[in-house]
Amino acid sequence: MSISAELVSSYLKSRARWSPLEIAFWIFAFATIFLFPSKYLIMKDTAILALFALSLDLILGYAGIISLGQAAFYGFAGYFAGLIAKYGFVTEPILGLILSGIAAAALGFVTSFLVLRGSDLTRLMVTLGVSLMLGEVANRYSDITGGADGLQGVDIEPIFGRFRFDLYGHNGYVYCLIVLFVCFVIARRIVYSPFGLSLRSLKGNSLRASAIGIPVKWRLVAIYTISAGFAGIAGGLLTQTTAFCSLDVFSLERSADLLLVLIIGGTGYLYGGLIGAVIYKFLQDWISNLTPQYWQFWIGLVLVVIVLIGRDRMQGWIEGGRAYLGNLASQLLPRSAALRGTAPDGRAEP
Amino acid sequence: MPILETKGLEKRFGGITAARDVNLSVEKGARHALIGPNGAGKTTVINLLTGVLKPTAGRIILDDHDITDVVPHKRVRRGMARTFQINQLFLDLTPLESVGLVVSERLGSGGDWWRVVGTKSAVTDEIVEIMERFKLVDIMHERTAILPYGKQRLLEIALAFACRPRVLLLDEPAAGVPEAERHELLATIEALPEEVTVLLIEHDMDLVFSFADRISVLVNGSLFVDGKPEDVARDPRVKAVYLGEELEA
Protein backbone atom coordinates (compact mmCIF):
# COMPACT_ATOMS: atom_id res chain seq x y z
CA MET A 1 0.00 0.00 0.00
CA SER A 2 1.42 3.35 -0.88
CA ILE A 3 0.39 6.85 -0.01
CA SER A 4 1.06 10.31 -1.34
CA ALA A 5 2.43 13.33 0.43
CA GLU A 6 -0.83 15.14 -0.29
CA LEU A 7 -2.78 12.51 1.59
CA VAL A 8 -0.41 12.70 4.54
CA SER A 9 -0.69 16.45 4.52
CA SER A 10 -4.48 16.38 4.44
CA TYR A 11 -4.61 13.79 7.24
CA LEU A 12 -2.36 15.92 9.38
CA LYS A 13 -4.30 19.07 8.67
CA SER A 14 -7.68 17.47 9.19
CA ARG A 15 -7.46 17.88 12.95
CA ALA A 16 -6.96 21.60 12.63
CA ARG A 17 -9.98 22.20 10.42
CA TRP A 18 -12.84 24.18 11.97
CA SER A 19 -15.71 21.80 12.56
CA PRO A 20 -19.33 22.89 12.02
CA LEU A 21 -19.91 22.52 15.75
CA GLU A 22 -17.15 25.00 16.49
CA ILE A 23 -18.50 27.49 13.97
CA ALA A 24 -21.94 27.14 15.52
CA PHE A 25 -20.40 27.73 18.96
CA TRP A 26 -18.89 31.05 17.93
CA ILE A 27 -21.96 32.20 16.01
CA PHE A 28 -23.97 31.60 19.14
CA ALA A 29 -21.34 33.34 21.28
CA PHE A 30 -21.60 36.49 19.18
CA ALA A 31 -25.38 36.20 18.92
CA THR A 32 -25.58 36.55 22.72
CA ILE A 33 -24.80 40.25 22.21
CA PHE A 34 -28.27 40.64 20.73
CA LEU A 35 -30.04 37.81 22.53
CA PHE A 36 -29.43 38.66 26.18
CA PRO A 37 -29.05 42.41 26.59
CA SER A 38 -29.97 42.20 30.27
CA LYS A 39 -27.07 39.83 31.03
CA TYR A 40 -24.12 41.88 29.76
CA LEU A 41 -22.35 42.13 33.09
CA ILE A 42 -22.35 38.44 33.89
CA MET A 43 -21.59 37.55 30.28
CA LYS A 44 -18.63 39.92 30.38
CA ASP A 45 -17.34 38.27 33.54
CA THR A 46 -17.86 34.92 31.86
CA ALA A 47 -15.83 35.92 28.82
CA ILE A 48 -12.97 37.09 31.05
CA LEU A 49 -13.12 33.90 33.10
CA ALA A 50 -13.19 31.87 29.89
CA LEU A 51 -10.03 33.55 28.62
CA PHE A 52 -8.40 33.08 32.00
CA ALA A 53 -9.33 29.38 31.97
CA LEU A 54 -8.08 29.06 28.40
CA SER A 55 -4.69 30.24 29.64
CA LEU A 56 -4.61 27.44 32.22
CA ASP A 57 -5.79 24.87 29.68
CA LEU A 58 -2.80 25.72 27.49
CA ILE A 59 -0.36 24.59 30.17
CA LEU A 60 -2.48 21.97 31.94
CA GLY A 61 -4.26 20.38 29.02
CA TYR A 62 -1.46 20.59 26.49
CA ALA A 63 1.77 20.50 28.47
CA GLY A 64 0.68 18.80 31.69
CA ILE A 65 1.81 21.63 33.97
CA ILE A 66 -0.52 21.94 36.92
CA SER A 67 -0.68 25.38 38.50
CA LEU A 68 -2.39 27.08 41.39
CA GLY A 69 -0.82 30.38 40.51
CA GLN A 70 -2.37 31.66 37.31
CA ALA A 71 -3.76 34.48 39.45
CA ALA A 72 -0.21 35.83 39.69
CA PHE A 73 -0.30 36.80 36.01
CA TYR A 74 -3.94 37.78 36.07
CA GLY A 75 -3.40 40.09 39.02
CA PHE A 76 -0.05 41.43 37.89
CA ALA A 77 -1.45 42.41 34.51
CA GLY A 78 -4.62 43.72 36.14
CA TYR A 79 -2.57 46.17 38.20
CA PHE A 80 -0.29 46.87 35.29
CA ALA A 81 -3.23 47.81 33.05
CA GLY A 82 -4.69 49.95 35.83
CA LEU A 83 -1.47 51.72 36.71
CA ILE A 84 -0.43 52.63 33.19
CA ALA A 85 -3.90 54.12 32.66
CA LYS A 86 -4.11 55.85 36.01
CA TYR A 87 -0.75 57.54 35.69
CA GLY A 88 -1.43 58.46 32.11
CA PHE A 89 1.23 56.38 30.34
CA VAL A 90 -1.20 54.49 28.15
CA THR A 91 -4.90 55.19 28.36
CA GLU A 92 -5.77 53.73 24.99
CA PRO A 93 -7.38 50.34 25.83
CA ILE A 94 -6.11 48.06 23.05
CA LEU A 95 -2.48 49.07 23.36
CA GLY A 96 -2.86 48.96 27.14
CA LEU A 97 -4.20 45.44 26.92
CA ILE A 98 -1.41 44.24 24.68
CA LEU A 99 1.17 45.77 27.02
CA SER A 100 -0.47 44.07 30.00
CA GLY A 101 -0.27 40.75 28.22
CA ILE A 102 3.40 41.31 27.41
CA ALA A 103 4.14 42.33 31.00
CA ALA A 104 2.49 39.17 32.32
CA ALA A 105 4.30 37.05 29.75
CA ALA A 106 7.61 38.56 30.88
CA LEU A 107 6.74 37.64 34.47
CA GLY A 108 5.77 34.16 33.26
CA PHE A 109 9.10 33.77 31.50
CA VAL A 110 11.07 34.72 34.60
CA THR A 111 9.07 32.53 36.97
CA SER A 112 8.97 29.58 34.57
CA PHE A 113 12.46 28.58 35.64
CA LEU A 114 11.26 28.20 39.23
CA VAL A 115 8.12 26.35 38.27
CA LEU A 116 9.47 23.90 35.75
CA ARG A 117 11.79 22.09 38.06
CA GLY A 118 10.27 19.42 40.21
CA SER A 119 7.11 17.40 40.32
CA ASP A 120 3.43 18.31 40.21
CA LEU A 121 3.26 18.99 43.93
CA THR A 122 6.31 21.26 43.78
CA ARG A 123 4.73 23.13 40.91
CA LEU A 124 1.47 23.61 42.77
CA MET A 125 3.34 25.06 45.72
CA VAL A 126 5.71 27.25 43.74
CA THR A 127 2.96 28.70 41.56
CA LEU A 128 0.82 29.33 44.61
CA GLY A 129 3.76 30.90 46.40
CA VAL A 130 4.51 33.30 43.55
CA SER A 131 0.95 34.59 43.46
CA LEU A 132 0.81 34.99 47.26
CA MET A 133 4.06 36.96 47.18
CA LEU A 134 2.82 39.26 44.45
CA GLY A 135 -0.42 39.81 46.36
CA GLU A 136 1.53 40.92 49.41
CA VAL A 137 3.79 43.16 47.36
CA ALA A 138 0.69 44.92 46.03
CA ASN A 139 -0.58 45.17 49.58
CA ARG A 140 2.72 46.55 50.90
CA TYR A 141 3.04 49.32 48.30
CA SER A 142 -0.43 50.66 48.92
CA ASP A 143 0.64 54.22 48.07
CA ILE A 144 0.89 53.07 44.45
CA THR A 145 -1.65 50.26 44.31
CA GLY A 146 -4.25 51.57 46.72
CA GLY A 147 -3.70 48.54 48.96
CA ALA A 148 -6.81 47.07 50.50
CA ASP A 149 -9.00 49.84 49.06
CA GLY A 150 -8.10 48.77 45.57
CA LEU A 151 -6.75 50.74 42.67
CA GLN A 152 -9.12 53.58 41.93
CA GLY A 153 -9.21 56.40 39.43
CA VAL A 154 -8.39 54.20 36.46
CA ASP A 155 -9.46 56.20 33.46
CA ILE A 156 -9.56 54.33 30.18
CA GLU A 157 -10.22 56.04 26.87
CA PRO A 158 -13.10 54.86 24.73
CA ILE A 159 -12.17 52.07 22.30
CA PHE A 160 -11.15 53.61 18.95
CA GLY A 161 -12.05 56.90 20.62
CA ARG A 162 -15.74 56.05 20.22
CA PHE A 163 -16.96 53.17 22.36
CA ARG A 164 -16.90 54.08 26.02
CA PHE A 165 -17.10 51.39 28.71
CA ASP A 166 -20.65 52.11 29.82
CA LEU A 167 -22.55 51.13 32.93
CA TYR A 168 -24.71 48.57 31.16
CA GLY A 169 -21.64 46.72 30.01
CA HIS A 170 -22.59 46.47 26.34
CA ASN A 171 -19.33 47.81 24.93
CA GLY A 172 -17.36 46.06 27.64
CA TYR A 173 -18.92 42.74 26.75
CA VAL A 174 -18.40 43.13 23.02
CA TYR A 175 -14.79 44.14 23.68
CA CYS A 176 -14.15 41.13 25.94
CA LEU A 177 -15.84 38.75 23.52
CA ILE A 178 -13.75 39.95 20.59
CA VAL A 179 -10.55 39.75 22.63
CA LEU A 180 -11.53 36.23 23.75
CA PHE A 181 -12.14 35.21 20.17
CA VAL A 182 -8.83 36.61 18.93
CA CYS A 183 -6.94 34.93 21.75
CA PHE A 184 -8.79 31.69 21.11
CA VAL A 185 -7.83 31.73 17.43
CA ILE A 186 -4.20 32.30 18.39
CA ALA A 187 -4.34 29.48 20.95
CA ARG A 188 -5.92 27.25 18.34
CA ARG A 189 -3.15 27.98 15.87
CA ILE A 190 -0.59 27.22 18.56
CA VAL A 191 -1.99 23.85 19.58
CA TYR A 192 -2.32 22.61 16.00
CA SER A 193 1.18 23.76 15.01
CA PRO A 194 4.32 21.59 15.14
CA PHE A 195 5.08 23.36 18.40
CA GLY A 196 1.70 22.35 19.79
CA LEU A 197 2.23 18.79 18.64
CA SER A 198 5.55 18.71 20.45
CA LEU A 199 3.79 19.87 23.62
CA ARG A 200 1.31 17.02 23.39
CA SER A 201 4.18 14.63 22.90
CA LEU A 202 6.14 15.77 25.91
CA LYS A 203 3.03 15.75 28.03
CA GLY A 204 2.52 12.13 27.01
CA ASN A 205 6.13 11.01 27.36
CA SER A 206 8.84 13.54 28.11
CA LEU A 207 11.55 10.85 28.20
CA ARG A 208 10.85 9.95 24.59
CA ALA A 209 10.34 13.56 23.60
CA SER A 210 13.90 14.38 24.57
CA ALA A 211 15.09 11.15 22.91
CA ILE A 212 13.80 12.41 19.56
CA GLY A 213 15.58 15.71 19.92
CA ILE A 214 12.95 17.95 21.48
CA PRO A 215 14.36 20.55 23.90
CA VAL A 216 11.71 19.72 26.50
CA LYS A 217 12.62 22.42 28.98
CA TRP A 218 12.52 25.25 26.46
CA ARG A 219 9.19 24.12 25.07
CA LEU A 220 7.75 24.22 28.59
CA VAL A 221 9.24 27.66 29.18
CA ALA A 222 7.67 28.85 25.92
CA ILE A 223 4.16 27.61 26.62
CA TYR A 224 4.29 28.80 30.22
CA THR A 225 5.23 32.26 28.97
CA ILE A 226 2.44 32.27 26.39
CA SER A 227 -0.05 31.06 28.96
CA ALA A 228 1.00 33.81 31.36
CA GLY A 229 0.44 36.33 28.57
CA PHE A 230 -3.10 35.06 28.02
CA ALA A 231 -3.84 35.16 31.75
CA GLY A 232 -2.47 38.70 31.73
CA ILE A 233 -4.80 39.77 28.95
CA ALA A 234 -7.71 38.41 30.99
CA GLY A 235 -6.53 40.40 34.01
CA GLY A 236 -6.11 43.51 31.88
CA LEU A 237 -9.65 43.11 30.56
CA LEU A 238 -11.01 42.96 34.09
CA THR A 239 -9.33 46.19 35.13
CA GLN A 240 -10.17 48.02 31.93
CA THR A 241 -13.84 47.12 31.90
CA THR A 242 -14.40 47.79 35.61
CA ALA A 243 -11.98 50.74 35.91
CA PHE A 244 -10.86 49.14 39.15
CA CYS A 245 -8.47 46.55 40.49
CA SER A 246 -8.34 45.04 43.95
CA LEU A 247 -6.02 42.70 45.84
CA ASP A 248 -8.60 40.00 45.33
CA VAL A 249 -7.17 39.37 41.83
CA PHE A 250 -4.22 37.59 43.44
CA SER A 251 -6.29 35.40 45.73
CA LEU A 252 -6.03 31.65 45.89
CA GLU A 253 -9.75 31.44 45.12
CA ARG A 254 -9.09 32.91 41.69
CA SER A 255 -6.69 30.13 40.81
CA ALA A 256 -8.83 27.47 42.47
CA ASP A 257 -11.95 28.63 40.61
CA LEU A 258 -9.96 28.24 37.45
CA LEU A 259 -9.18 24.61 38.15
CA LEU A 260 -12.87 24.14 38.95
CA VAL A 261 -13.82 25.63 35.60
CA LEU A 262 -11.51 23.24 33.80
CA ILE A 263 -12.76 20.28 35.81
CA ILE A 264 -16.28 21.17 34.73
CA GLY A 265 -15.39 21.83 31.11
CA GLY A 266 -12.49 19.42 30.58
CA THR A 267 -8.95 20.04 29.40
CA GLY A 268 -6.96 19.54 26.24
CA TYR A 269 -9.49 20.56 23.61
CA LEU A 270 -9.51 24.35 24.17
CA TYR A 271 -13.28 24.63 24.59
CA GLY A 272 -13.14 23.21 28.11
CA GLY A 273 -12.30 26.56 29.66
CA LEU A 274 -14.99 28.32 27.65
CA ILE A 275 -17.77 25.85 28.31
CA GLY A 276 -16.66 25.43 31.91
CA ALA A 277 -16.70 29.19 32.45
CA VAL A 278 -20.23 29.48 31.06
CA ILE A 279 -21.54 26.64 33.23
CA TYR A 280 -19.70 27.85 36.32
CA LYS A 281 -20.79 31.47 36.05
CA PHE A 282 -24.41 30.76 35.30
CA LEU A 283 -24.63 28.05 37.90
CA GLN A 284 -23.16 30.48 40.40
CA ASP A 285 -25.60 33.19 39.33
CA TRP A 286 -28.60 30.91 39.39
CA ILE A 287 -27.81 29.19 42.68
CA SER A 288 -26.82 32.38 44.46
CA ASN A 289 -30.21 33.81 43.52
CA LEU A 290 -31.88 30.81 45.11
CA THR A 291 -29.72 30.64 48.24
CA PRO A 292 -27.49 33.70 48.47
CA GLN A 293 -25.65 32.41 51.52
CA TYR A 294 -25.05 28.79 50.68
CA TRP A 295 -24.43 28.79 46.96
CA GLN A 296 -20.98 27.30 47.34
CA PHE A 297 -22.56 24.18 48.79
CA TRP A 298 -24.24 23.52 45.47
CA ILE A 299 -21.12 24.30 43.46
CA GLY A 300 -19.31 21.82 45.67
CA LEU A 301 -22.01 19.23 45.09
CA VAL A 302 -21.83 19.68 41.33
CA LEU A 303 -18.07 19.26 41.52
CA VAL A 304 -18.33 16.03 43.50
CA VAL A 305 -20.94 14.66 41.11
CA ILE A 306 -18.81 15.48 38.07
CA VAL A 307 -15.78 13.76 39.51
CA LEU A 308 -17.79 10.72 40.62
CA ILE A 309 -19.60 10.24 37.35
CA GLY A 310 -16.37 10.86 35.50
CA ARG A 311 -16.02 13.11 32.57
CA ASP A 312 -15.26 10.22 30.23
CA ARG A 313 -18.71 8.86 30.78
CA MET A 314 -20.33 12.25 30.26
CA GLN A 315 -18.26 12.74 27.15
CA GLY A 316 -19.55 9.36 26.00
CA TRP A 317 -23.10 10.65 26.40
CA ILE A 318 -22.24 13.78 24.47
CA GLU A 319 -20.54 11.82 21.70
CA GLY A 320 -23.56 9.53 21.57
CA GLY A 321 -25.91 12.46 21.32
CA ARG A 322 -23.77 14.05 18.66
CA ALA A 323 -23.64 10.83 16.63
CA TYR A 324 -27.44 10.58 16.90
CA LEU A 325 -27.85 14.16 15.68
CA GLY A 326 -25.36 13.45 12.90
CA ASN A 327 -27.34 10.43 11.76
CA LEU A 328 -30.54 12.40 11.91
CA ALA A 329 -28.99 15.19 9.87
CA SER A 330 -27.60 12.82 7.24
CA GLN A 331 -31.03 11.21 6.84
CA LEU A 332 -32.68 14.57 6.48
CA LEU A 333 -29.95 16.05 4.29
CA PRO A 334 -28.55 13.20 2.21
CA ARG A 335 -26.79 15.43 -0.29
CA SER A 336 -24.77 17.56 2.05
CA ALA A 337 -23.72 14.44 3.93
CA ALA A 338 -22.44 12.90 0.72
CA LEU A 339 -20.35 16.01 0.09
CA ARG A 340 -19.00 15.92 3.60
CA GLY A 341 -18.25 12.22 3.47
CA THR A 342 -14.86 12.72 1.81
CA ALA A 343 -13.23 14.20 4.90
CA PRO A 344 -10.36 11.90 5.83
CA ASP A 345 -10.89 12.22 9.52
CA GLY A 346 -14.21 10.74 10.46
CA ARG A 347 -13.65 11.10 14.16
CA ALA A 348 -15.22 13.90 16.08
CA GLU A 349 -13.11 16.23 18.18
CA PRO A 350 -12.68 14.90 21.70
CA MET B 1 37.35 4.41 11.66
CA PRO B 2 35.15 4.34 14.74
CA ILE B 3 32.11 6.62 14.70
CA LEU B 4 31.25 6.01 18.33
CA GLU B 5 33.76 5.38 21.10
CA THR B 6 33.79 5.25 24.84
CA LYS B 7 36.96 5.68 26.84
CA GLY B 8 37.14 4.35 30.38
CA LEU B 9 33.41 4.80 30.86
CA GLU B 10 32.28 4.19 34.39
CA LYS B 11 29.04 4.54 36.30
CA ARG B 12 28.56 3.98 40.01
CA PHE B 13 25.25 4.10 41.83
CA GLY B 14 26.29 4.52 45.45
CA GLY B 15 28.31 1.39 46.16
CA ILE B 16 27.27 -0.47 43.03
CA THR B 17 29.35 -0.20 39.91
CA ALA B 18 27.01 -0.68 36.94
CA ALA B 19 29.63 0.04 34.29
CA ARG B 20 33.37 -0.34 34.78
CA ASP B 21 36.08 0.89 32.41
CA VAL B 22 34.01 0.30 29.28
CA ASN B 23 36.04 0.93 26.12
CA LEU B 24 33.61 0.38 23.30
CA SER B 25 34.45 1.16 19.72
CA VAL B 26 31.81 1.05 17.01
CA GLU B 27 32.98 1.30 13.40
CA LYS B 28 31.21 3.46 10.85
CA GLY B 29 28.49 1.47 9.08
CA ALA B 30 28.88 -1.47 11.47
CA ARG B 31 26.18 -3.83 12.67
CA HIS B 32 27.48 -4.06 16.17
CA ALA B 33 25.79 -6.06 18.90
CA LEU B 34 26.19 -5.57 22.62
CA ILE B 35 25.17 -8.68 24.50
CA GLY B 36 25.40 -9.93 28.03
CA PRO B 37 23.42 -11.72 30.69
CA ASN B 38 20.69 -9.99 32.68
CA GLY B 39 22.00 -7.23 34.88
CA ALA B 40 25.27 -6.98 32.98
CA GLY B 41 24.81 -3.23 32.54
CA LYS B 42 23.70 -3.08 28.91
CA THR B 43 20.93 -0.60 29.54
CA THR B 44 23.23 1.46 31.74
CA VAL B 45 25.66 1.74 28.84
CA ILE B 46 22.82 2.82 26.51
CA ASN B 47 21.68 5.42 29.03
CA LEU B 48 25.22 6.72 29.32
CA LEU B 49 25.62 6.90 25.56
CA THR B 50 22.37 8.81 25.11
CA GLY B 51 22.94 11.10 28.07
CA VAL B 52 20.05 9.97 30.25
CA LEU B 53 22.71 9.11 32.85
CA LYS B 54 25.88 11.04 33.58
CA PRO B 55 29.01 8.89 33.78
CA THR B 56 31.03 8.89 36.98
CA ALA B 57 34.18 8.81 34.85
CA GLY B 58 35.24 8.43 31.24
CA ARG B 59 34.48 10.06 27.91
CA ILE B 60 32.09 9.44 25.03
CA ILE B 61 33.17 10.39 21.52
CA LEU B 62 30.76 10.63 18.61
CA ASP B 63 32.31 11.25 15.23
CA ASP B 64 35.48 12.82 16.73
CA HIS B 65 33.51 15.10 19.05
CA ASP B 66 33.46 14.65 22.79
CA ILE B 67 29.76 14.52 23.70
CA THR B 68 30.14 13.49 27.34
CA ASP B 69 28.63 16.75 28.57
CA VAL B 70 26.08 17.22 25.81
CA VAL B 71 22.42 17.06 26.92
CA PRO B 72 20.27 14.23 25.49
CA HIS B 73 18.23 16.16 22.93
CA LYS B 74 21.38 17.69 21.48
CA ARG B 75 22.98 14.28 21.07
CA VAL B 76 20.05 13.47 18.81
CA ARG B 77 20.88 16.51 16.72
CA ARG B 78 24.50 15.36 16.61
CA GLY B 79 23.36 12.13 14.98
CA MET B 80 22.65 9.51 17.63
CA ALA B 81 19.16 8.20 18.30
CA ARG B 82 17.87 5.29 20.32
CA THR B 83 14.91 3.01 20.76
CA PHE B 84 13.73 1.72 24.11
CA GLN B 85 13.51 -1.78 25.48
CA ILE B 86 10.06 -0.98 26.82
CA ASN B 87 8.07 1.03 24.29
CA GLN B 88 8.21 4.75 24.90
CA LEU B 89 5.59 5.98 22.48
CA PHE B 90 3.18 8.87 22.35
CA LEU B 91 0.06 6.86 23.07
CA ASP B 92 -2.44 9.64 22.37
CA LEU B 93 -0.92 10.54 19.02
CA THR B 94 -1.27 8.59 15.80
CA PRO B 95 1.83 7.12 14.12
CA LEU B 96 1.41 9.81 11.50
CA GLU B 97 1.50 12.57 14.10
CA SER B 98 4.36 10.96 15.99
CA VAL B 99 6.55 10.59 12.92
CA GLY B 100 5.43 14.01 11.69
CA LEU B 101 6.55 15.44 14.99
CA VAL B 102 10.03 13.94 14.74
CA VAL B 103 10.50 15.04 11.15
CA SER B 104 9.27 18.56 11.91
CA GLU B 105 11.69 18.79 14.81
CA ARG B 106 14.62 17.65 12.75
CA LEU B 107 13.87 19.94 9.83
CA GLY B 108 13.81 22.82 12.25
CA SER B 109 10.12 23.63 12.39
CA GLY B 110 9.55 22.14 15.84
CA GLY B 111 9.32 25.57 17.38
CA ASP B 112 7.03 26.84 14.65
CA TRP B 113 3.84 27.78 16.45
CA TRP B 114 1.91 29.44 13.68
CA ARG B 115 1.80 27.04 10.74
CA VAL B 116 -0.52 24.05 10.90
CA VAL B 117 1.25 20.66 11.09
CA GLY B 118 1.66 19.07 7.68
CA THR B 119 1.85 22.17 5.48
CA LYS B 120 5.52 21.80 4.57
CA SER B 121 6.15 19.42 1.68
CA ALA B 122 9.68 18.60 2.83
CA VAL B 123 8.10 17.23 5.99
CA THR B 124 5.27 15.31 4.37
CA ASP B 125 7.53 13.73 1.73
CA GLU B 126 9.74 12.34 4.41
CA ILE B 127 6.82 11.10 6.47
CA VAL B 128 5.64 9.11 3.46
CA GLU B 129 9.05 7.51 3.07
CA ILE B 130 9.25 6.50 6.73
CA MET B 131 5.68 5.21 6.85
CA GLU B 132 6.41 2.96 3.91
CA ARG B 133 9.79 1.79 5.16
CA PHE B 134 8.33 0.77 8.53
CA LYS B 135 5.08 -0.64 7.10
CA LEU B 136 2.92 1.69 9.10
CA VAL B 137 0.83 3.01 6.24
CA ASP B 138 -2.35 1.06 6.86
CA ILE B 139 -2.50 1.98 10.55
CA MET B 140 -1.01 5.47 10.39
CA HIS B 141 -4.26 7.10 11.40
CA GLU B 142 -5.00 4.95 14.45
CA ARG B 143 -4.25 5.99 18.00
CA THR B 144 -0.90 4.50 18.98
CA ALA B 145 -2.35 3.08 22.20
CA ILE B 146 -4.56 0.61 20.32
CA LEU B 147 -1.98 -0.68 17.81
CA PRO B 148 -0.87 -4.33 17.85
CA TYR B 149 2.38 -4.80 19.74
CA GLY B 150 4.39 -5.62 16.64
CA LYS B 151 3.33 -2.35 15.00
CA GLN B 152 4.16 -0.43 18.15
CA ARG B 153 7.60 -2.00 18.05
CA LEU B 154 8.02 -0.89 14.44
CA LEU B 155 6.90 2.61 15.38
CA GLU B 156 9.41 2.58 18.22
CA ILE B 157 12.18 2.12 15.66
CA ALA B 158 10.57 4.46 13.13
CA LEU B 159 10.65 7.35 15.60
CA ALA B 160 14.37 6.87 16.20
CA PHE B 161 15.02 6.41 12.49
CA ALA B 162 13.11 9.58 11.66
CA CYS B 163 15.81 11.50 13.56
CA ARG B 164 18.11 10.47 10.66
CA PRO B 165 20.81 9.24 13.02
CA ARG B 166 24.26 8.24 11.87
CA VAL B 167 24.31 5.92 14.86
CA LEU B 168 21.13 4.08 15.77
CA LEU B 169 20.95 2.34 19.14
CA LEU B 170 18.40 -0.47 19.21
CA ASP B 171 17.57 -1.66 22.71
CA GLU B 172 16.14 -5.19 22.40
CA PRO B 173 13.98 -4.34 19.39
CA ALA B 174 12.42 -7.79 19.16
CA ALA B 175 11.62 -8.16 22.85
CA GLY B 176 8.14 -9.51 23.43
CA VAL B 177 7.08 -9.47 19.80
CA PRO B 178 4.82 -12.46 19.04
CA GLU B 179 6.08 -14.98 16.49
CA ALA B 180 3.51 -13.96 13.85
CA GLU B 181 4.68 -10.33 13.82
CA ARG B 182 8.36 -11.08 14.26
CA HIS B 183 9.28 -11.61 10.65
CA GLU B 184 8.11 -8.17 9.56
CA LEU B 185 10.11 -6.55 12.33
CA LEU B 186 13.33 -8.44 11.61
CA ALA B 187 13.04 -7.79 7.88
CA THR B 188 12.70 -4.08 8.60
CA ILE B 189 15.77 -4.09 10.81
CA GLU B 190 17.71 -6.01 8.13
CA ALA B 191 16.69 -3.40 5.58
CA LEU B 192 18.02 -0.39 7.49
CA PRO B 193 20.25 1.63 5.17
CA GLU B 194 23.89 0.59 5.15
CA GLU B 195 25.25 4.01 5.97
CA VAL B 196 23.44 3.98 9.32
CA THR B 197 25.63 2.47 12.00
CA VAL B 198 23.61 0.19 14.25
CA LEU B 199 24.43 -0.73 17.82
CA LEU B 200 22.10 -3.53 18.83
CA ILE B 201 21.49 -4.52 22.44
CA GLU B 202 19.86 -7.90 22.40
CA HIS B 203 19.07 -11.03 24.32
CA ASP B 204 17.95 -13.04 21.36
CA MET B 205 21.04 -14.91 20.13
CA ASP B 206 19.48 -15.91 16.79
CA LEU B 207 18.92 -12.29 15.96
CA VAL B 208 22.37 -11.28 17.15
CA PHE B 209 24.22 -13.89 15.14
CA SER B 210 22.18 -13.38 11.97
CA PHE B 211 22.51 -9.62 12.09
CA ALA B 212 25.75 -8.52 13.70
CA ASP B 213 29.17 -8.30 12.12
CA ARG B 214 30.77 -7.50 15.44
CA ILE B 215 29.83 -8.47 18.98
CA SER B 216 30.83 -7.10 22.36
CA VAL B 217 29.99 -9.06 25.48
CA LEU B 218 29.31 -7.18 28.69
CA VAL B 219 29.50 -8.99 32.01
CA ASN B 220 29.17 -7.34 35.42
CA GLY B 221 29.55 -3.90 33.91
CA SER B 222 32.81 -4.66 32.08
CA LEU B 223 33.54 -5.46 28.46
CA PHE B 224 34.45 -9.09 28.51
CA VAL B 225 34.98 -10.13 24.92
CA ASP B 226 34.92 -8.10 21.76
CA GLY B 227 35.23 -9.55 18.28
CA LYS B 228 33.73 -11.11 15.20
CA PRO B 229 30.63 -13.27 15.71
CA GLU B 230 32.41 -16.53 14.94
CA ASP B 231 35.21 -15.74 17.41
CA VAL B 232 32.77 -14.75 20.10
CA ALA B 233 30.71 -17.89 19.51
CA ARG B 234 33.82 -20.03 19.99
CA ASP B 235 35.08 -18.19 23.03
CA PRO B 236 34.90 -20.57 26.01
CA ARG B 237 34.45 -17.72 28.52
CA VAL B 238 31.32 -16.50 26.73
CA LYS B 239 29.95 -20.01 26.68
CA ALA B 240 30.62 -20.29 30.38
CA VAL B 241 28.79 -17.03 31.12
CA TYR B 242 25.74 -17.95 29.08
CA LEU B 243 25.68 -21.58 30.15
CA GLY B 244 26.11 -20.46 33.74
CA GLU B 245 23.14 -18.17 33.40
CA GLU B 246 21.05 -20.88 31.84
CA LEU B 247 21.95 -23.31 34.58
CA GLU B 248 20.97 -20.76 37.21
CA ALA B 249 17.71 -20.09 35.41
Image (tube, rainbow, N blue to C red):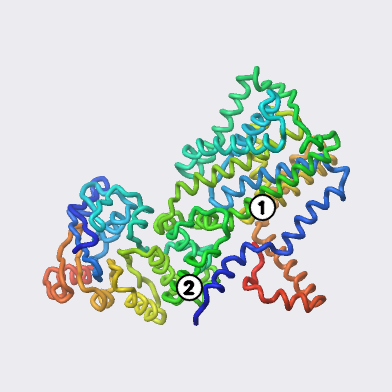
Q: Residue at x 65, y 49 (%)?
A: A263
Of the pair A85 and A199, the residue shown nearer to us? A85
Residue B161 position by quadrant: bottom left
Q: Position of residue A60 (x, y in %)?
A: 57, 49
Q: Position of residue A215 (x, y in %)?
A: 43, 51
- The answer to whether any part of residue A247 appears in the image is no
Three-letter amino acid code of the residue under disc 1: Val
SS of the residue under disc 1: helix
Q: Which mark is residue A53?
A: none
Tell me: B144 left or right of B206: right
Q: Residue at x 34, y 74 (%)?
A: B192
Chain letter, disc 1 residue: A
- Which residue is disc 1 drawn over? A185
Q: Position of residue A206 (x, y in %)?
A: 45, 54
Q: Position of residue A143 (x, y in %)?
A: 65, 17
- Which residue is disc 2 drawn over? B128
Same subunit: marks 2 and 1: no
Q: Residue at x 87, y 47 (%)?
A: A36
Chain letter, disc 2 residue: B
